[in-house]
Amino acid sequence: MKTSLIFTFFLAASLVLSGCGNKQEETETEEEASEKSPADALQAFADKAKEMGNREAVDPVDFRKLKEILPEELSGLKRTESTGEKSGAMGFTVSTAEGKYRGNSDESIDVEIIDTGGIAGVSTMALAAWSMADIDKETTTGYEKTTKIDGYKAFEKYNNESKSGEINVLVGDRYLVNIEGNNVSIDQIKGILKEIDLSELAALK
């Protein structure tokens, strides 16, 4: 996992679980909700993240199990590197596995699997904020959108000029699968995702 992502995750987890939800819960009408200020909306987001963070804690799986899900070859691209680690800070622990895949020319794919374990709910705020949003955006060079893949919340992003993109999938509100590709088409990235057994990942304990 990239260092910046680890830091963001642990920092968000610490802030959310240490007291973001001090505001008393209230029942709102649709009209009242529509009149919320940006500060109120941010507080509601924090309250929701804290609520999810109160789920029953479980230990993240051994990163070696996550590495087993990453095949030696994906869509003709050979795995050139395979790493894994268990990281902890501020009382929280996550397991990660990453595989780097390269083709005969300039194609490259990086696949990362993260188990957020005991603070699975906080993952949606720290690492998958898109899963709590509705995104559908197009530009002259590409697009980004939220979607569903095999019933799981997902996010797609692609740039036609650089031929680079990513797909992120949240599995069971606990596991994150991040696929980044360079010098590949979005169809190639989608094809690679299909070669990763998400049901096997969801069943890991």
Image: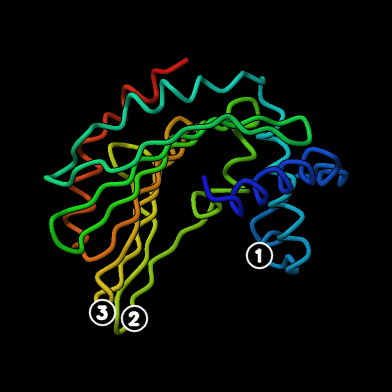
Q: Residue at left 41%, top 40%?
A: 98
Residue 139 is marked as 2
Give the quadrant of residue 200.
top left
Determine whether label 3 and label 2 are within 8 Å by CB: no
Left or right: where 66 falls relative to 86: left
Give, as a three-letter code, the residue at label 1.
Ser
Q: Position of residue 157 (x, y in %)?
A: 35, 63
Element at badge 1?
Answer: helix
Left or right: where 158 falls relative to 124: left
Q: Position of residue 189 (x, y in %)?
A: 23, 53
Q: Residue at left 39%, top 56%?
A: 146
- Circle 3 is placed at which residue position? 161
Residue 34 is marked as 1
Give the quadrant of residue 138.
bottom left
Q: Residue at left 61%, top 19%?
A: 59
87 or 161: nearer the eye? 87
Q: Position of residue 47 (x, y in %)?
A: 74, 45
Mark 1 closeness class: few <14, some 14–19, many ≥20 residues within 10 Å: few
Left or right: where 36 falls relative to 95: right
Point out the frontmost of discs 2 and 1. 2
Marks 3 and 2, Cα distance to the nearest angstrom? 11 Å
